[in-house]
Amino acid sequence: MHDKTLTELAAGLRAGEFSSVELTRAYLERIEQFDTDLNCFISVARERALASAERADARIRDGSADALTGIPIAHKDIFCTSGLRTSCGSKMLDNFVAPYDATVVARLEAAGTVMLGKTNMDEFAMGSSNETSFYGVVRNPWDRTLVPGGSSGGSAAAVAARLCGAATGTDTGGSIRQPAALCGITGLKPTYGRVSRYGMIAFASSLDQGGPLTRSAADAALMLQAMAGFDPRDSTSAQQAVPDYSGQLDADLRGLKIGLPREYFESGLDAEVAASVQAAIAEYRHMGAEVVDISLPNSGLSVATYYVVAPAECSSNLSRFDGVRFGHRCEQPKNLEDLYKRSRSEGFGAEVKRRIMIGTYALSAGYYDAYYLKAQQIRQLISEDFRKAFGQVDVIMGPTSPTTAFAIGEKADDPVTMYLSDIYTIAANLAGLPGMSIPVRPVAGRPVGLQIIGNYFQEGKLLNVAHRLQRESDWHLAAPVGF
Amino acid sequence: MQWETVIGLEIHTQLATRSKIFSGASTAFGAEPNTQACAVDLGLPGVLPVLNREAVVMAVKFSAAIGAELARRSVFARKNYFYPDLPKGYQISQFELPIVGRGAVEILLEDGSRRTIGVTRAHLEEDAGKSLHEDFHGLSGIDLNRAGTPLLEIVSEPDMRSAREAVAYARKIHQIVRYTGISDGNMQEGSFRCDANVSIRRPGGELGTRAELKNINSFRFLERAINFEIERQIDVLESGGKVVQETRLYDPDKDETRSMRSKEEANDYRYFPDPDLLPLEIDEAFIAAAIADLPELPDVRRARFVTEYGLGEMDAAQLTASREMADYYEAVAKAAGDARLAATWVMGALAGALNRDGLDVTASPLSAQRLGGLLARIADNTISGKIAKQVFESMWAGEASADQIIDQQGLRQITDSGAIAGIVDQVLSDNAQQVESYRQAEPPKRAKMLGFFVGQVMKLSKGKANPAQVNELLKERLES
């Protein structure tokens, strides 16, 4: 049962092969069995999940069920859930229970999904390995000595280990796509504004975007269908109609123009990962797609630009965690300054502090023009590169990450090397474009992700392109040994 | 030594929207602490601001009222600093691209002269909450009801040269925001707050170092705070010291300003565009709709009062000080059929009675219709002005109309010349000696003496004899 895709699970529920309660129990048992070790979940909402599964079964019986009704999923612990702790992977919010649901949570709830719990993540989504979480590292189900990637590492590992039908994640610089690649699953970061950010704890507001982590592109289409759409509570959400994603999945790819940016295949890319990605692209050629060499000349500036913009925004976004109204407060503050300093020093981990300091510096008087403003200008250039590229091609392909999953602890003390693991994913966030990662041929038993970047609001096209490969191959169906 | 004062004002005016600038919570004043603060106002994790359209409409109205350049595209920015009553750790404001650009207002000084004061800009922003330091046994309380209340911060050019000009400018802005209905301007409740930047210099010289005066919540305090600060700076400079750039707090109890923080202690606000809010773009249709219901503005109305009603400039200014007063005056003038008489009474008896009872014109027990009815009886000679004062007091205290009181108390003026002649003759025969002195006096002295006879006639007629007729008849009899 747990090995089925969402489409299969939905069909099984509809056909009465199993109930949502049975399915929910099965996943809860698997979480109990495997998660002590994997550490994918920060909170498991057993009773709440079962109650919600019962309601879903009633809807299935009375015929009012939607496509996802009764499907057990998990939410990244960055999405606020009314009445259930939302920690954002931080000691700062270890005691925080929001009085409201994030729009993403509310929409998936309305669609009838069953929330199993909240998944582990890098603290405040700042990390690429899930090692910055206050709740400990998440282990990669393919090899427990490896990281799952991050920051949506708990969601990616949970989907890979079949601990839930699908999961939500957020992607600020690659936080859905990179862990999806490292865990051998499908991850989609939609166009900026496609999915509401309301109730999603902000890391870098102009880059953050929620999206699904699933077993297949067809599953991602179902999830995105429920998540996407304008939200009057998020001024940056797009007032654009949501197309029927599942309906476009099978469209023919003959004549599709795929752009391969030469900058994505230069030094720094693992040769075997490159070969695997090229093999997948060869499949697309067989399906009738045309492959075009393109250039994104400013790609080399992505990481530097990102590490000004994202920390600048986070330094401001994280100011509200001050020990005054909610979250961690130090014991016996002597005065206001002591309250601020100790609450924040104790509540935040090292990576979060590092980024707050970088961001504060970048926005300071006298440095703003040289850092923040310059970074915004480069951001424009990067968007312009993509605009030109999409004048020539329909989608852009390349590796999601330069290497396969690395060992826990391997890069933990070297932030710059860690930052480079998002070198291919960051540009899509800076430009606001949709990007996807799907599993292709593994290297030495470790998953490899193919990244597909589309033009604005072309999620349907991305899902279509991904799905056609998944029709012709079964890399996405492979489960880690023992799961 | 000669010093010239240079003053610029920053006025925070609370916009009269029903809900907050970025959330749906109510802006009503005086609720129990923290009952009008929603998740957005509390800055809970994950919440996002959504701009209140009405606040934008109000900024557009203000822009039109001062003839300012209205930015078709403006940008909200975050002003970052830590304070317990600032929930997000930043205030959403506008920095580089404010909605209202350069404009100007004209002030009319007491000597009748006019000056134009430049407005540099006005921008939309959210208010912070309030810290309460009493009653918490060594702790501080935070009330976030005010957090997120919409403000329009109006920044002037350093164009004012005295405390009086600064007050005249502040009153002018106050008048405009009240006329346009974008703020209730209530200073006690903090809906209209002034910060003053004050410096002194040699006339025509380089600008001096300024001090920013905060916490001024009345026009009277504004004048006193600036005057205190001017004296302080002159003392500092004339005793060989230097004025330091700092923020000073005005203490109305001690009537002095005190240093709050120096430039070195000032925050680096790390302004940057708020990524949660798209740039604000407004088009011509939005502007047209926003200014469609703008009322006649005070300067225009004042000029009209001069031409239409034949009033003097200062009288017209006084009567148009508030929209309510001007509306009241025009209604009185219409009902009375005599605009100048109406002006005299509204600025005299009515203003005096309102002031005595501490009432605003909107709470006047005497409606414009009733007052107009009284004045109409003066105009048509039914009663004299003096009797009218008496009727006015009765009307103020009760419900009756002027006509009812005049009839009940028998106050109708005596205009019958036969009746007046009888009284005049009576007075002349009762005062034969005075009549004799009058007739022997030099003509220039007679005018004064005539007053005695008029007074006697009025006394005898209980004030009801028509004074013009009395005068005429007395002269006729005495000169004959």
Image (cartoon, rainbow, N blue to C red):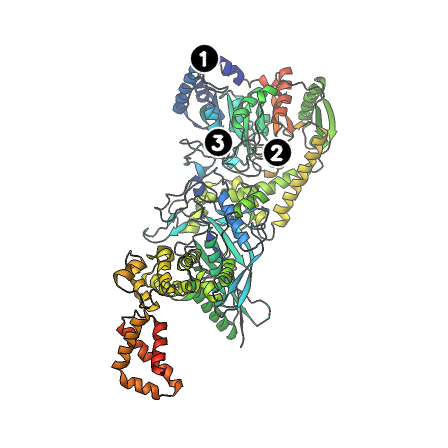
Q: CA distance from mark 3 to mark 1?
A: 29 Å
Q: Residue at x 53, y 73 (%)?
A: B3
Residue type pointed to by label 1:
Phe
Q: Chain of mark 1?
A: A
Residue B127 x %, y %:
46, 49
Camera-side mark, 3 or 1: 3
Q: Is residue B468 left or right of residue A418?
A: left
Q: Residues within 10 Å of mark 2 (few under 14, many from 20)?
A: many
The answer to which quarter of the image holds residue A220 is: top right
Q: Amino acid at mark 3?
A: Thr
Helix, strand or loop status at disc 2: loop
Tell me where residue B399 sits by quadrant.
Answer: bottom left
Q: Which mark is residue A18?
A: 1
The answer as to whether the residues below labels 3 and 2 share one chain is yes
Three-letter amino acid code at disc 2?
A: Asp
Residue A200, image x, y percentages: 50, 34
Q: Which residue is mark 2?
A: A422
Above or below, comparing residue B285 to residue A196 in the picture: below
Q: Quadrant of the C terminus of chain B?
A: bottom left
* Disc 1 secondary structure class: loop
| Picture residue at 59% right of the left edge, 44% below the top | B284
Left or right: residue B422 compared with residue B253? left
Residue holding disc 3: A103
